[in-house]
Structure formats: structure tokens, C-alpha cells
Amino acid sequence: MEEDDVTIREQNFHSQVREYIICFLLFAVLYIVSYCIITRYKRKTDDQEDEDAVVNRISLYMCTFTLAMSGGAVLLLPFSIISNEILLSFPRNYYIQWLNGSLIHGLWNLVSLFSNLCLFVLMPFAYFFLESEGFAGSKKGIKSRVLETFVMLFLLGLLILGIVWVASALIDNDAASMESLYDLWEFYLPYLYSCISLMGGLLLLMCTPVGLSRMFTVMGQLLVKPTILEDLDEQIYCVTLQEEALQRRLNGSTSSHSRSHGNAHQLNKELDIVRDQRNKLERRKKASAWEKNLLYPIVMLILLTGTTISVLLVALNILYLLVDETAMPKGSTDRGLGNTSLSTFGVVQAVVEIVLMFYLMVSSVVGFYSLRVFEGLTPRKDDTTMTTIIGCCVSILVLSSALPVMSRTLGITRFDLLGDFGRFNWLGNFYIVLSYNLLFAVVTTLCLVRKFTSAIREELLKALGLDKLQLSNSPTDPESGKIAANGHQKTL
């Protein structure tokens, strides 16, 4: 019996060490990738070892940690689904024994814990640390800035706890709820994170439909469109003449003192627009036939198929919610992994679900930066301040943490939420879940209909020659029409 107990303890010890090593390696990979991404967009500063440089470096490490947690939250559900299918396909394989339910649950709990830490501690600390200067009368330095930051964090924590206490007291005024108001660890933190997850879900509900329709425009800008009834040589010739005319006017304004500085700035702006249009036309001309006539339609068809499948899955989930209460998103109580497949068509459906999750995440990020409210957070290569990077990391963390919840709520996957992700209070409310599904389906359909009808309307206006009247909603059409018209006048 003693030897058996020792053997069991050794097995538990080795399995825990193995899980820690795997978690550390996964986090190290995510941290390195996040560091490369942030340093690509971070504004380049002098390499002087002054106080501000140290503060920026500490804030950079915190932002990198937060972005790594965002990547982990995005990969949670796909990694769990593919692990379940692998264990079903190879149940007795020795080389995948490390892939078990304990590891998956541990990853979910770690991501939930560190997401809370980043959202409520690290990111507020990084922001206040950047903005701090030390209390008046104190000696300037890192210590005084750290002290001011901790004081600001303490006051912010009191403010948030007070708001949550008042809100929970107003919503639930029974005796049990009033007693739980004094339980910080078991009531405040889960309730607070449940509110944050609901806000993240609402933000995804607002950004994802916009991003799904915006993805067609983004891919249209990255890819080369087919050339149909267009003479690219003539367009390039007109734009080249326009560029030469603007260049002569700019040279005349720089050599003559009669021109104002504002006029020269306007000429430079117009010249950049013309050069950008010429580069696009030359790229379309140099593109191969398969890239113009095959790649663009295939990519557009893939985007349309992914969006259509997402809307159909949400519509089916609405029907399931109306007829079967087991369709409600709930936390998983069974720790067994690899027992049953949650996909009707096995591995194929699991792969489709994973692709749709990544597609929805990319679309939500594109839609987030497409909204006018968040346009100021758009990162620019080598020209993004640390304050903007903090805002981007917080936004992406909220979106990525809500992605598993949204995927399960919309019925994209049937894999139950594990760990603390399944403890959100609002997931058990039938009316909230049903309304969420209905709003997503309706808003996504309206955005797609508006997108395609506006594209058809613009093409009809161009065919009728009415695009010069600036009736189109596209902000680039009037400029391109103006440039083309001016170039045509130069040709004449």
C-alpha cells in the first residue's frame, strides 16, 4: 500500500511539473510574438537611460504580458476543441498522454486569473505610472512615481468596489444578497468579472457585424481586383500627367515667395494622393492573370461563405434555444476530456468551428478600429505612443476574453466553457442569451445587405456617369473622380 501511495504521489508530481512546463512554453511563445508586435508599432525613442525610458520599458513589459494573455484567451477554445478530437482519435497513444483534462482546465483557469490581473491591476498601473510625476514636495524619481501610482490604484479600487456594491444592492435586495455584499473574494470579483465579460460581449456584438462587412473592403484593398472594361494604360497616363502638373506647381511654389506655406502643404497632400493612385494602377497592371481573375473571386467567395455559415449557425442556435434548454451556455462540470465528440461531423466540423472563431476574432478587431469612437486607437508603425498601446491592449484583451463566451453563446461551438469562464451570472439568463443571438443575426444581415447594395449603387452611378456628383458614400470616390477628371482635362 505504501509503495502504491508513493507511486501515485510521484505520478501526480510529474504530471504537475509537466503541465507547468507546457504552460510556461506556451506563454513564452505568446510573449515573444506579442513583444515583436508591440515593438513594431511602438514609437522609437532615444536609447538614453533616463527616468522616462525606464517607465516606458516597464509599461512595455506589462503591455506585452497583457497582449500575450489576449492571445491565450483567443486560443483557449480552438486548442480545447482540437485536443478533444485528438484524444478521441488516438485514445491510447503514448505520445499524447500529456494532453489531458487537467492541462486544459489549468490553462482556462490561468488565462482567467491573469486576464483579471491584467485588466484590473497591470494596465491601470501602466497607465498611471506613465502619467505620474510624483507628489508635490516629494523627491523626484522612480520611487515617488511608484508611490503615486499605488495611491491612484487604491483610490480606483475603492471607487470600483463602491460602484459594484451599490449596483448589486439595488439589483438584489433580499437577505442572502445583502449578506454576500461583505464577501469580497466569493462575490465581488466573480460579479465584477461577470459584468466585464458582459461588456466585452456587447462590444463584440457591436464590432463583429461591422467587421464582417468591412472585411470585404479590406481584402479588396489588399488584393488586385479583376480588370473588366477598363483601360489601365489610359488611366495611368492621365494620372501621370496629373502628377507632373502638380510637381511643376509645387516646384514653382517653392521657388517663388508669393506662394503661401499652406498652399504648398495642400499641393504635397494632393501629390501624395496622386502617387498612391498611380502605384495602385501600376500594381494592377503588373499583377498576373491568376491573381486578378482567380485569387480575388476566391477570397471574396470564402469571406461570403464564412459570414453566411456564421449567420446560419446563429439562426439554428436560436431555434435550439426555443425548443431545448440544454442549448444554453453553461460551465462544464465534467472534467473528462476525450469522452465524446461535441461535433456532429467529427474533425471536419471541429476545423470549421475553429476557422469561424478566428474569422470572427479578426472581424471584431477590424470592426473595432473601423468605428469612429475607437479610430484614435488605431496603431501606426513606429509611431504609436505607449498610452495608445495600453488602450489597444486593454481593448484586445476585453475582446479576446469575451470570444469564447460569444462563440458558445452564439452556438458556433457546443464545447462548454471551462473554469471560471462558465461562472458568469448572465449566461444563465434565457432572455439575455436569446436577445444576443437575435441582435447578432439581425445586425450582421443588415450590415451585409447595406454593404452589397451600396457597392451595386456605386457601380450604377459610375456607369451612368453620376459619380462626379459625389452621390457615393465612399470617401475616396470624390477624390479619385476629381483626380481622374483633372487628368482627363490635362490629356485634352
Image (tube, rainbow, N blue to C red):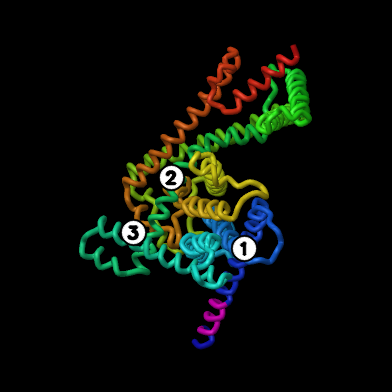
The alpha-carbon separation of the residues under discs 2 and 1 comes to: 45 Å
Q: Earlier in the sequence, mark 2 or mark 1?
A: 1
Q: Nearer the viewer, residue 138 or 447?
A: 138
User: Which SS type dominates the magenta stretch?
Assistant: helix
Q: Earlier in the sequence, mark 3 or mark 1?
A: 1
| Disc marking residue 52 | 1
Circle 2 — which element?
loop
Q: Nearer the viewer, residue 344 or 172?
A: 172
Instruction: Say few, some or many: other residues with alpha carbon within 10 Å of mark 1 (under 14 / 14 to 19 / 20 or more).
Output: few
* In-image side of 428 versus 212 (left or right): left
Query: Residue drawn 38% across and 55% down?
Result: 195
* In-image side of 468 versus 328 (left or right): right
Say which amino acid is labelled 2. Answer: Leu
Q: Quadrant of residue 265?
A: top right
* In-image side of 364 versus 428 (left or right): right
Query: Residue drawn 71% across and 61% down?
Result: 47
| Disc marking residue 284 | none
- Give x and y (percent) for residue 185: 37, 69
In the figure, 135 relative to 221: above or below?
below
Q: Earlier in the sequence, mark 2 or mark 3?
A: 3
| Disc marking residue 163 | 3
Front position among marks 2 and 3? 3
Q: Which residue is mark 2?
A: 410
Q: Is residue 109 magenta?
A: no
Q: Is residue 8 magenta?
A: yes
Instruction: Say few, some or many: other residues with alpha carbon within 10 Å of mark 3 (under 14 / 14 to 19 / 20 or more).
Output: few
- What range of the chain is rendered magenta? 5-13
Which quadrant does the C terminus fall into? top right
The alpha-carbon separation of the residues under discs 3 and 1 comes to: 34 Å
In the figure, 161 relative to 367: above or below?
below
Q: Nearer the viewer, residue 14 or 426?
A: 426
